[in-house]
């Protein structure tokens, strides 16, 4: 029964996010409620939060690239990316993002996950190029700019997620194998990796089709 | 041995510079909040291990309090769009060189560093080789950029602060979500959900069980913000006992497509750093990245149910 009480943190998150409270506050409140409902004292809860926070510092190492990106932007990186996109005849946001999706999935499937990324590729290169590709079609505006940027970010995530599991030595394949084995079920890593291919193909087909529709929505597809 | 702590010292030094430049930013009426926030983040990287778990917890909650109040709008002097166009014309494609150095060095480091030994001991902490290589790539690329473009002194930290302030308080949300995951695990949230699902469907048919497994992976991932936290719970509760043992499903297919169903959840949740960081970095309204991803995620999730149902019992 005490286990069921520990679920109280989940409605805290749902209500907090629905009420548009600051997510930092919502998440912390959910952690405290969950800990109290699970029978922990305040010192134990704060210590768990501290340990979890510390152990996850590796996630924030990505911010180390921001001074470099900012400096390159100061010297016109995004402007240059736009020029590059404008020089490629027939480039549309959808076509550019489909090409990046394919490249991201293939490289991730080969274990080359670090070739892409939101800070390293999307903000400095892919997003401005996609925006420039839309501009040449004559459609601008903040709404479509945000839409294109959001799709640039989405492609990086979708390509990475539905590519990485095809690579045999990556964390997730090894985690799947380890968890199955804990439950007394054996599965070779190669088989786990290979059976990620059908979903990867579906994901590419679905998302590429949606990117073509994005072009149509932006008034690009028919013009060419 | 060079470990991840050396990387944390560099990251901590960067955030310390952000804190100091924030303190000097008289254009931001809330500059002391920004100074305190980034100063605490710097302290977490520089001294998080010495602070201990309880001390770090107090630090994290103090950052939440300051971040919840708001950090104010910073002012950073940067170039105008006209200056940028002129500079882009001058430097041309050389502007891409540092950007390409980062992944190349990261990749080379990830492949080569584990093999390098000094005095019989590995040069770097092998488990953290990707993070160490990424930091190395960033530092090398920054040095190359400084040599190529010769910016005025102080420009690089100021430009870094410009982007850090664009991310703002969201910078600590991914780490805070990981902390929430640690509390969830200690309180037994996973077992509670697994038990609930287990009670709900003991004798259902194959398709229903496969659908509950895949959709459950997506939903639980949305709550936890991480498919890796959801998979052990649902594999132990449904995947292994029901789909593999009771119905004879192929474990590699069940495991692989199950995890990929979790990723569909990652694409749809505001709790995942994969959605938080780009939203902040690209200056997008909340939910914009998720809206771009959700239709694909839902279609792929549906396809996964079908794929597992048709493949797992045939191969």
Image (tube, rainbow, N blue to C red):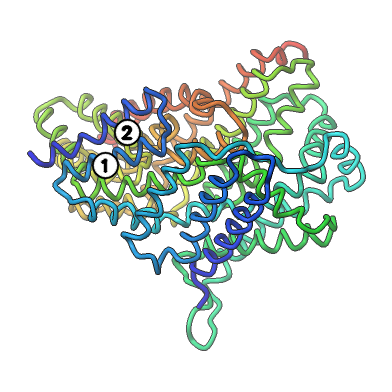
Q: Are marks 1 and 2 in contact (CB under 8 Å)?
A: yes
Hey, which quadrant is residue A154 in on the image?
top right
Q: Which label was assigned to residue B299?
A: none
| Residue holding disc 2 | B311
Disc 1 crowd, CA 10 A, few/some/many (<14, 14-19, 20+)? many
**In front of the other: B146 or A153:** B146
Residue at figure coordinates x 64%, y 36% from the top left? A100
| Residue holding disc 1 | B250
Q: CA distance from mark 1 to mark 2?
A: 8 Å
Q: In this rendering, would A169 be left or right of B212?
A: right
Outermost residue, bottom side: B119
Precedes in sequence: disc 1 or disc 2: 1
Quadrant occupied by the N terminus of chain A: top left
Element marked by disc 2 = helix
Can you say whether A8 is above or below A90 in the image?
A: below
Residue B256: give x, y in percent of width and height. Answer: 35, 42
Disc 2 crowd, CA 10 A, few/some/many (<14, 14-19, 20+)? some
């Amino acid at each position: 029964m005490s286990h069921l009480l520990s679920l109280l943190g989940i409605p805290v998150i749902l209500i907090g996010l629905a009420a548009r409270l600051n997510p930092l506050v919502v998440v912390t409140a959910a952690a405290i409620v969950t800990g109290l409902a699970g029978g922990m004292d305040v010192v134990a809860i704060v210590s768990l939060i501290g340990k979890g926070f510390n152990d996850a510092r590796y996630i924030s190492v990505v911010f180390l690239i921001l001074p470099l990106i900012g400096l390159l932007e100061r010297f016109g990186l995004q402007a240059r990316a736009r020029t590059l996109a404008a020089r490629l005849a027939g480039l549309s946001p959808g076509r550019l993002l489909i090409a990046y999706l394919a490249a991201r999935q293939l490289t991730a499937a080969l274990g080359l996950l670090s070739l892409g990324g939101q800070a390293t590729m999307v903000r400095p290169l892919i997003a401005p190029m996609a925006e420039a590709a839309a501009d040449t079609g004559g459609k601008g505006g903040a709404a479509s700019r945000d839409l294109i940027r959001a799709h640039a970010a989405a492609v990086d995530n979708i390509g990475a997620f539905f590519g990485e599991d095809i690579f045999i030595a990556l964390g997730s394949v090894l985690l799947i194998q380890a968890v199955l084995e804990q439950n007394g079920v054996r599965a070779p890593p190669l088989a786990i990796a290979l059976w990620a291919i059908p979903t990867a193909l579906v994901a590419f087909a679905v998302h590429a089709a949606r990117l073509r529709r994005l072009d149509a929505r932006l008034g690009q597809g028919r013009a060419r | 041995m060079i470990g991840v702590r050396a990387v944390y010292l560099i990251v901590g030094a960067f955030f310390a510079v952000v804190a100091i430049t924030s303190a000097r930013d008289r254009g931001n009426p809330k500059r002391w909040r920004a100074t305190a926030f980034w100063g605490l983040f710097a302290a977490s990287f520089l001294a998080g291990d010495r602070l201990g778990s309880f001390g770090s917890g107090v630090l994290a909650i103090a950052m939440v309090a300051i971040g919840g109040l708001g950090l104010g709008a910073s002012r950073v002097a940067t170039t105008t769009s006209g200056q940028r166009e002129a500079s882009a014309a001058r430097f041309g494609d050389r502007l891409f060189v540092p950007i390409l150095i980062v992944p190349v060095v990261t990749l080379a480091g990830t492949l080569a560093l584990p093999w390098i030994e000094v005095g019989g001991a590995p040069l770097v902490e092998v488990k953290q080789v990707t993070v160490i290589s990424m930091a190395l790539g960033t530092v090398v690329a920054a040095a190359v950029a400084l040599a190529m473009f010769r910016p005025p002194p102080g420009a690089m930290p100021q430009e870094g602060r410009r982007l850090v302030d664009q991310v703002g308080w969201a910078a600590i949300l991914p780490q805070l979500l990981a902390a929430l995951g640690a509390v969830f695990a200690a309180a037994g949230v996973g077992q509670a959900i697994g038990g609930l699902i287990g009670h709900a469907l003991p004798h259902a048919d194959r398709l229903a069980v496969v659908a509950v497994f895949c959709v459950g992976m997506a939903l639980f991932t949305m709550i936890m913000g991480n498919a890796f936290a959801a998979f052990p719970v649902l594999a132990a509760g449904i995947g292994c006992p029901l789909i593999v043992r009771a119905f004879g499903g192929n474990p590699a297919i069940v495991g692989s497509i199950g995890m990929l169903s979790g990723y569909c959840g990652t694409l749809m949740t505001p709790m995942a750093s994969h959605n938080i960081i780009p939203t902040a970095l690209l200056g997008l309204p909340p939910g914009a990245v998720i809206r771009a991803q959700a239709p694909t995620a839902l279609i792929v999730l549906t396809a996964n149910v079908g794929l597992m149902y048709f493949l797992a019992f045939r191969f």
